[in-house]
Amino acid sequence: MENKTMYTTKEAADYLGVSPSTIYRMEKRGLLSPTKTPGGRRGFSQKDVEEWLRTPQSFESPLIRETPAPYEISAKAEPYFQEDSIQIYSADFLRTNCVKEGTVDLIVTSPPYNVGIKYNSHDDKMSYEHYLSFTREWLTRCYRLVKDDGRFCLNIPLDKNKGGQQSVCADITTIAKQEGWKYHSTIVWNEQNISRRTAWGSWLSASAPFVIAPVEVIVILYKDRWKKISGSRKSDISKEEFMEWTNGVWNFMGESKKRVGHPTPFPVELPRRCIKLFSFVGDTVLDPFLGSGSTLKDA
C-alpha cells in the first residue's frame, strides 16, 4: 500500500492483514482510534497503524480473534419490489450490497433460531458453533450499515433447550458487543401462547429438573451514541404508548404460522412498538431477515 497520512477502515485492515470487522473490534478495545476525515468519514492515521505493527501484540484475544469470511459480496441486487421509499430485496443479506453503509437509522429483525425449522434456502440445523459464526457475520454487516446514532432491536430466544441447553441470548449479546455494538437494555416478551409443558422425567425429584421460560427477548443495541440526533426529530408515539412500552416486559400474543403462511412469523405488534419507540418519523428502517414482512408492514 502506498504511503498516506490517513487510512480508511478497509485500507487499515489490508495494511495490517486482518478483516475490517477486526479493525472495529480493535477500535472498541481502544487499540486504534479513528478520526473524522474532512468528508465526514472515519479514518485511521498512518502513525497509529504503523505503531500498532511495531508494538508486540497478539490477535489471539477472543475480543479481536480473526474469523474467516465465507461470504463474498456480489453485484448489487435489483429490488424485488419498490414504491416510494419502500424497497424489498429477494436476496442473501450477506452476499449482496443492497444498502449503503452508514445510512440506516433502526434495524428490527428476528434471525433464524437454529431449531430445525424448514426454510426454503437456510440451514436451520447448524452446529451451535457454526450458528454463532453465522451470527457474527450478519451482526458485523448490520453494524456497518447503521448511522453513528443507529439502533438495533434484536428479537432472539432467551435460551435453547432443543438439542442441548444453550444460553442463546447471552452468547449473541456477547458477540454483538465484540463486533462493536453497545448494549442498552433488554425487553422480555411474554408471547402468552406457548403451551404449558412439564418435564415429567424430573417430577417430584431434584435429580434433573427442567426450567422452561415461555418468553423471548428483544435486545436493544446501538452503534456509537444512544442519544439520537439525526432524522426528523418527530415522533408519532402517544404518551400512553410511551409509558406502557418503556416497561421492559411486553405482553402480547405471538403470530400464527398457519394464518400468515410462514414457518416463523412474528406479530406486527413487535416491530410497531420498536419503530415508534426507537425511531423518528421518516427514518430508514431495515429488516435483514424480512420473513413474512411484519417489519415492512408496520414501517
Image (spheres, rainbow, N blue to C red):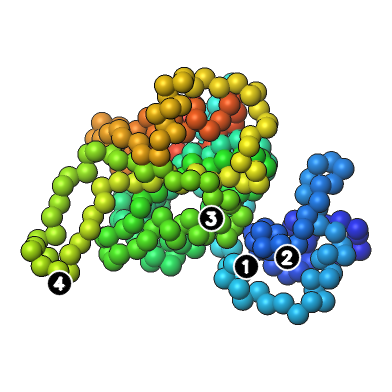
Looking at marks 4 and 3 on the same chain, the residue that comes earlier in the sequence is marked by 3
* Residue under the image location 26 percent in, 51 percent down: 213
Residue, x 59% and y 63% (percent of image)? 69
Contact between labelled residues 2 and 4, with CB atoms less than 8 Å apart: no
Mark 4: which amino acid? Ser
Closer to the observer: label 3 or label 2? 2
Figure quadrant of the N terminus: bottom right
Residue 240 lies, in percent from the top left, at 42, 21
Determine if residue 251 is in view.
yes
Mark 1 lies on a secondary structure that is loop
Identify the residue under disc 1.
Answer: 64
Choose the circle earlier in sequence order: 3 or 2: 2
Q: Identify the mark nearer the N-term, 4 or 1.
A: 1
From this view, report whether residue 213 is shown above or below residue 264: below
User: Amino acid under label 3?
Assistant: Ala
Q: Where does label 4 land, which residue?
A: 207
Rendering coords of residue 205 (x, y %): 10, 67
* Pointer 2 residue: 31
Quarter of the view holding residue 23: bottom right
Which residue occupies 62% across, 46% down? 223
> Between marks 2 and 1, how big is the CA–CA gap?
10 Å
Q: How far apart are marks 4 and 2 (CA)?
A: 48 Å
